[in-house]
Image: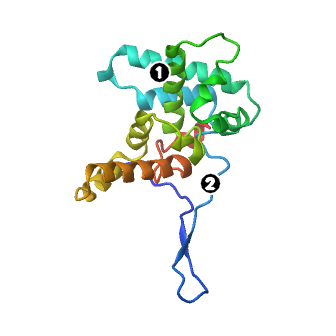
């Protein structure tokens, strides 16, 4: 079981107007956290260890390693103290679905496999909480593997329980609800840490 992380939570805000529905104050997104402050060496070691799947074959792992390396090379050229700072400074978050155009600028017409490599690397950074893209960016993506990997890395038992609790819903509604919850976990962080000693390596 993963250790619990202390995070701010959303809380109800009392309405002073009679008849108004109870409102909720959203949890404020953190500006910095231990995963985004990790050195490149520690970050790569953690992500490759967290997401390597022996049953998936060497080809996928090589693609992930290559994509992660290229993406980090590009992000290191952006201003900022953390990976999140560099992601935002790169304007990739504003670019939405076209974000891969930015690291591939000046390289002629990019082949599809180069975009796929970068996308694969980004899955690791997002699911591993090194960067937290904005909701507009997340909602414009079509990478279902990012949601799947986030659920597996964040708290697979909790997501499995949620899915079981929603068995009465239609498959479409259940999938939509789980995706929305996963977007929240990506943006505001999950309820558990991926490594009890990771803060020491930040």
The answer to whether 37 appears left or right of 142 in the picture is right
Which residue is label 2 attached to? 29
The answer to whether 47 appears left or right of 27 in the picture is left
Which is more N-terminal, label 2 or label 1?
2
Residue 3 visible here: no
Q: Is residue 16 above or below residue 34?
A: below
Residue 111 rendering spot, x and y as whole percentages: 54, 12
Query: SS at mark 2?
Result: loop
Q: Residue at x 38, y 54 (%)?
A: 177
Q: Are marks 1 and 2 in contact (CB under 8 Å)?
A: no
Residue 56 rendering spot, x and y as whole percentages: 32, 21
Q: Is residue 168 above or below residue 25?
A: above
Residue 152 visible here: yes
Other-residue count near label 2 (Cα within 10 Å), few / some / many at <14 / 14–19 / ≥20? few
Q: Quadrant of residue 105?
A: top right
For the residues marked 1 and 2, what is the alpha-carbon distance in whole angstroms?
28 Å
Which quadrant is home to the C terminus? top right
Other-residue count near label 1 (Cα within 10 Å), few / some / many at <14 / 14–19 / ≥20? many
Q: Quadrant of residue 72?
A: top right
Q: Residue at x 51, y 16 (%)?
A: 112
Q: Pick out the residue farthest to the left.
A: 168
Which residue is label 1 attached to? 64
Q: Residue at x 60, y 45 (%)?
A: 134
Query: SS at mark 1?
Result: helix
Q: Is residue 149 above or below residue 5?
A: above
Residue 78 rendering spot, x and y as whole percentages: 74, 28
Q: Pick out the residue farthest to the top.
A: 108
Q: Pick out the residue farthest to the right.
A: 79
């Amino acid at each position: 079981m993963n250790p619990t992380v202390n995070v701010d939570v959303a809380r109800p805000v009392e309405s002073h107007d009679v008849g108004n529905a109870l409102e909720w104050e959203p949890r404020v997104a953190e500006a910095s956290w231990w995963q985004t402050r990790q050195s490149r060496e520690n970050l790569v070691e953690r992500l490759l260890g967290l997401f390597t799947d022996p049953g998936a074959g060497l080809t996928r792992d090589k693609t992930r390693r290559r994509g992660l390396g290229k993406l980090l090379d590009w992000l290191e050229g952006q201003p900022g103290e953390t990976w999140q700072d560099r992601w935002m400074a790169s304007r990739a978050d504003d670019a939405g679905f076209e974000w891969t155009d930015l690291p591939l600028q000046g390289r002629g017409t990019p082949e599809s496999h180069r975009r796929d490599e970068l996308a694969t690397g980004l899955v690791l950074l997002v699911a591993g909480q090194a960067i937290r893209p904005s909701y507009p960016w997340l909602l414009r993506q079509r990478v279902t593997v990012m949601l799947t990997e986030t659920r597996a890395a964040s708290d697979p038992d909790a997501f499995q329980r949620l899915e079981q609790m929603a068995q009465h819903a239609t498959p479409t509604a259940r999938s939509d609800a789980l995706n929305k919850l996963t977007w929240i976990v990506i943006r505001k962080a999950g309820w558990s840490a991926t490594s009890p000693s990771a803060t020491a390596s930040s």
